[in-house]
Structures are given as structure tokens and as C-alpha cells.
């Protein structure tokens, strides 16, 4: 038997009539049926023969290809010059990578295997060869390369530690910079060592448990474990890992996030919640005591006052003739102080309720509310000339009964401290103030010294003596408590003899009001 023909000899017999042997028609058929492009060209580059696959490959009719200069099919004509130089120097090329361009302009990545065609005298007549397309392979290689580049960037730039280690013994194959920064080790100290040799796992059973889960599930997510750093510090980490195969070796790739501070914060929150629950329990007990106190004040304390006041009135009514002026003055003083004590009890109860009353938030027409409160108070101040000036007020979103109490207290304050004015003037205005609405109540009364401004809203604190202006010193404290419960602020400005203005804010609707 004769030797098998090489691919180059087969191509030559298929396309070169001068080399055809007894079975040349068979080779021609194979030439035409080949899925790869088979060609023969002159040394100058003219295509002398080319098979049918070339038409589909390049997008030209076969008649267009025969006689065409091969350089027209190159994506870069200079590539043909390089190819020609190499093939003539070596006599042949195998799997020479080249880019061709189709008729529609798209590029094709190909491998070119070609030999020189010689004349009987040894002169170069041209070239013959096979063109095999590898465009999809090149795309896949490029995609793989890009994927590897992206992985490499993610691997090295991740703020979490990423490590690749063998499944069997945890020997480190690669780690990123975050691993080194967090653990404190250098790359030389880590690569090739096992996690056991570095004493990374605080609990070796935890690694065994993780390995068992990986073998069973092939991946784990958010597995919490404690690791020992090079410094000896123990930190809590959250790990996600998957099994991968590296050249036949089962390995683990894991991403580990340091959650030590988060765990500390969680523990602190648990501690605070526990303390809060304790405080809430204490507050509940305190509220129960306050309820009991309020009941005692309302009944036990008020009852003897009613008795004292009643006996004082009876003495004045039935036995006035038997009393001298001093005795009558004493009984009158008893009644005045009983009434003052009753007002104090009422105010204390109101102050207590203002902090515990459940709030029902709703839209409030402040124009209407201000007018109603003013008219109600003016009705119990006959003979006085009191004018109200109010701009168009912004609506409020609050508890209507509590805001009414605020206005009653502020207007009562203005009524009281404008008593010395022939004509009293109260002005009410509002305007947006960020996420709040600012309201103001201004009067032309006796005013106050600004050095006492902060104390005005404290319980039992008064800006004037009780002899000149009656009161218990609780009204403004109630205002402060109600506005604070709504998430607002209250303050005052004034000047002695020139009136005062009280400001309060309420959150706008939808602004996260509590």
C-alpha cells in the first residue's frame, strides 16, 4: 500500500489539473463539498480556483471570486503581505490566524493552512490552502477573557475578603487584598498554607460543619463564623461559598464579610431594648401611680377643700352679725385661697392628662379654631375692649382638643396680661417653617424680662407676682408638653412693658409626624 496523501497534496490534486491522478474526480468532489474554503491563487494574489463554500463564506458569487485579488478579502490588506512573506520564507503555514471581510463588511476570524505551488523548474507559481472559520470561537475566547478580567477586578477590588482554597484541607490557592488587610497576614504567609496552620477558625468544628453543608448543597449563603486574626483578635464574619473545580481539584471560593461591628451594634441594641422594656414597664407602673394620685387629688384633696369653703360661706351668711371686720376678712381670705387651691388642682390634673391623653391626629381649620377660642374667652371678660387680628392661618394636622387647649392657655395668658391696657390687641399669624408650620400669638400686654424666657414653660414658674396677676404657673407648662408631644417646639419673646409673643410649631402633614 502507498502512503496516505497529506492535506496539502490532496488540495493540490483537487484544484491543480496538472497534479491529478487516476482518482482525481473523487478529490474534486471532496474539494467542492468541503465546509471549509479551499482555494488556489497566483503569487500576485489572483484567485484561480475556489470551492462552493467560499460563496456562502465571503458572500460573493463564485464568478465574482474567480479572478479577484485575494487582498480585497483581507480585513487588513497588510496582513496578506505578512502572510506572503512568511509562507515564502517557510514554504507553508499551518493555522495562521487572519481576519477576512465579507461582502457585507462583517469580519471573520479564520485559520489559514497553505502551501506554495511550484513550477517544474522550482519557481513559485502561487499558493493553495484551506480557510477554517473560528469567529464564534474567538467571540467565546474574548467573552471568557472579559469575564476573567471582570472577575479579576471584582476579586482584587472587593472590600470583602475573597479566598480560593482546596476543599480537602483548606489550603489557600489565592486571596484578595481585603483578605490580607482584614487578617493582617502577608500574601507569602497565606498562599500554600491551610486555614488550620494559620489558626483562622476559632472553632474547628464550625469549618467541618461548613464543609459538610458544601458537600451536600454545593453552596452556602450567609454562614456566620468567628475567625482569629494574625494579631489574635477574634472577629465575627458572614460567609458565602461555592464549590468549584480547578484543574480537577475540588476547591472552595468564599466571600467573607466582616460583621463584627454590626454584631456589636446588634448586641447594644438588644441591651438598649431590654433597658427600654424595663423603662416602659416602670413607666406603666408610674402611670398607674399617677392615675391613683390623680384620683386622690380629684377626690380626697378636693373634698376637704369643698368642706372648708362651704363652712366659710355658711359662717359669713348665718353668723356675720356676730363677727367683727377682722373675722369677716379671715373668712373671705379662706374662700379666696380655697378657690385658688381648686384652680391649682384643676391645672395639675390638666397637666397630668396632657402628657397621657391619646392623640387623634386630624386636619384642623386653624382660622375657625382661633375665632371660636377667642369668642369663648371674650364672653367671660365683659366690659373689656379686646381686638383680634389674624391673618389667613395655615391648617394644622394635630389633635384638635389638645391644640384647642394650647390656644385657650395662650389667649388666657394674653387676656390676663393686657388687663392694664385700655384697648387690648391680640395678633395671630402663621407661615411655613421647613417641614413645620410656625404659629405666633402676640399681645400688647405688660411683657416680661427675657432673662426669664426659658423658665416660663416650667411648672409653677411665673413671670409676675401672684398679687398683680393671678395664676398657678402651670398653663404654659401644659402648652409646652402638648406641642412637644406633637413633635414641635414652643418659645417666647418679650420686653417689659411692650408686650409678648409666643411661638409654636407643628409638623406639616406627611412629614413623619409621630
Image (spheres, grey):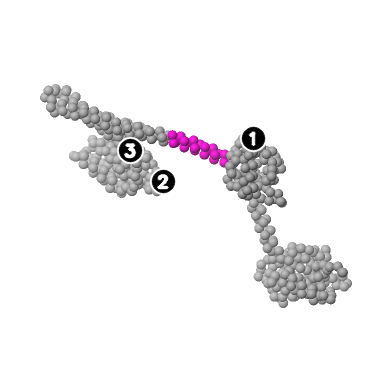
Q: Which residue is mark 2?
A: 512
Q: Mark 2 or mark 3: which comes first in sequence? A: 3
Percent x, y of residue 509: 38, 48
Q: Which residue is mark 3?
A: 354
Foreground pick, 507 / 302: 302
Quarter of the rendering containing residue 236: top right
Q: Would residue 76 be seen by someone viewing this image from the given angle?
A: no
Q: Is residue 268 magenta?
A: yes
Q: Identify the residue at horizontal 78%, vertical 72% (top origin).
A: 40
Residues shaded magenta: 259-278
Q: CA distance from mark 1 to mark 3?
A: 57 Å
Q: CA distance from mark 2 to mark 3?
A: 21 Å
Foreground pick, 27 / 371: 27
Q: Which residue is mark 1?
A: 231
Image marks 2 and 3: residues in contact by CB distance under 8 Å: no
Mark 2 is surrounded, within 10 Å at the Cα level, by few (under 14), some (14 to 19) or many (20 or more) other residues, namely few
| Disc on res. 138 | none
- Disc 2 or disc 3, which is closer to the eye? 3
Q: Mark 1 or mark 3: which comes first in sequence? A: 1
Q: Identify the residue at horizontal 66%, vertical 67% (top origin).
A: 106
| Quadrant housing the N terminus | bottom right
Q: CA distance from mark 2 to mark 1?
A: 46 Å
**Dominant secondary structure of the magenta stretch?**
helix
Picture layout, residue 347 above or below residue 97: above
Q: Identify the residue at horizontal 43%, vertical 34% (top origin).
A: 278
Q: Would residue 268 be seen by someone viewing this image from the given angle?
A: yes
Amino acid at each position: 500500500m502507498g502512503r496516505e496523501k497529506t492535506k496539502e497534496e490532496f488540495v493540490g490534486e483537487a484544484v491543480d489539473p496538472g497534479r491529478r491522478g487516476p482518482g482525481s474526480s473523487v478529490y474534486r468532489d471532496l474539494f467542492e463539498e468541503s465546509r471549509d474554503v479551499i482555494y488556489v491563487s497566483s503569487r500576485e494574489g489572483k484567485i484561480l480556483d475556489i470551492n462552493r463554500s467560499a460563496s456562502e463564506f465571503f458572500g460573493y458569487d463564485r464568478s465574482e471570486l474567480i479572478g479577484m485579488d485575494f487582498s480585497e478579502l483581507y480585513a487588513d490588506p497588510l496582513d496578506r503581505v505578512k502572510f506572503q512573506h512568511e509562507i515564502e520564507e517557510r514554504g507553508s503555514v499551518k493555522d495562521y490566524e487572519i481576519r477576512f471581510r465579507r461582502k457585507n463588511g462583517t469580519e471573520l476570524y479564520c485559520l489559514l493552512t497553505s502551501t506554495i505551488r511550484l513550477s517544474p523548474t522550482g519557481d513559485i507559481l502561487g499558493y493553495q490552502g484551506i480557510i477554517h472559520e473560528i469567529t464564534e470561537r474567538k467571540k467565546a475566547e474574548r467573552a471568557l477573557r472579559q469575564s476573567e478580567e471582570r472577575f479579576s477586578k471584582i476579586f482584587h477590588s472587593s472590600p470583602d475578603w475573597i479566598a480560593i482554597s482546596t476543599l480537602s484541607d483548606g489550603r489557600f490557592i489565592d486571596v484578595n487584598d481585603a483578605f490580607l488587610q482584614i487578617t493582617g497576614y502577608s500574601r507569602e504567609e497565606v498562599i500554600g498554607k491551610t486555614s488550620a496552620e494559620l489558626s483562622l477558625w476559632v472553632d474547628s468544628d464550625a469549618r467541618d460543619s461548613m464543609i459538610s453543608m458544601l458537600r451536600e448543597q454545593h453552596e452556602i449563603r450567609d454562614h456566620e463564623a468567628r475567625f482569629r486574626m494574625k494579631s489574635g483578635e477574634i472577629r465575627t464574619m458572614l460567609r458565602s461559598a461555592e464549590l468549584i473545580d480547578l484543574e480537577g481539584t475540588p476547591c472552595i471560593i468564599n466571600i467573607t464579610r466582616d460583621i463584627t461591628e454590626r454584631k456589636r451594634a446588634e448586641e447594644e441594641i438588644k441591651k438598649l431594648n431590654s433597658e427600654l422594656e424595663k423603662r416602659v414597664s416602670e413607666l406603666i407602673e408610674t402611670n398607674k401611680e399617677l392615675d391613683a394620685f390623680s384620683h386622690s387629688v380629684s377626690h380626697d384633696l378636693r373634698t376637704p377643700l369643698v368642706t372648708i369653703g362651704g363652712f366659710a360661706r355658711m359662717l359669713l351668711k348665718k353668723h356675720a352679725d356676730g363677727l367683727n371686720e377682722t373675722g369677716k376678712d379671715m373668712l373671705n381670705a379662706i374662700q379666696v385661697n380655697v378657690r385658688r387651691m381648686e384652680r391649682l388642682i384643676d391645672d395639675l390634673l390638666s397637666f397630668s392628662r396632657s402628657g397621657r391623653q391619646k392623640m387623634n391626629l386630624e386636619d384642623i381649620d386653624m382660622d375657625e379654631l382661633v375665632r371660636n377660642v377667642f369668642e369663648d374667652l371674650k364672653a367671660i371678660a365683659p366690659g373689656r375692649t379686646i381686638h383680634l387680628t389674624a391673618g389667613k392661618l395655615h391648617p394644622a394636622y394635630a389633635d384638635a382638643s389638645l391644640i384647642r387647649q394650647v390656644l385657650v392657655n395662650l389667649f388666657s395668658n394674653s387676656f390676663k396680661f393686657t388687663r392694664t391696657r385700655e384697648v387690648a390687641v391680640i395678633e395671630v399669624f402663621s407661615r411655613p417653617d421647613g417641614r413645620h408650620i410656625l404659629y405666633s400669638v402676640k399681645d400688647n400686654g405688660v411683657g416680661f424680662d427675657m432673662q426669664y424666657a426659658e423658665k416660663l414653660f416650667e411648672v409653677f414658674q411665673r413671670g409676675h407676682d401672684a398679687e398683680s396677676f393671678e395664676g398657678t404657673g402651670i398653663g404654659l407648662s401644659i402648652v409646652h408638653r402638648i406641642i412637644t408631644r406633637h413633635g414641635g417646639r414652643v418659645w417666647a419673646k418679650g420686653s417689659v412693658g411692650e408686650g409678648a409673643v409666643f411661638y409654636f410649631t407643628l409638623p406639616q402633614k406627611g412629614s413623619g409626624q409621630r
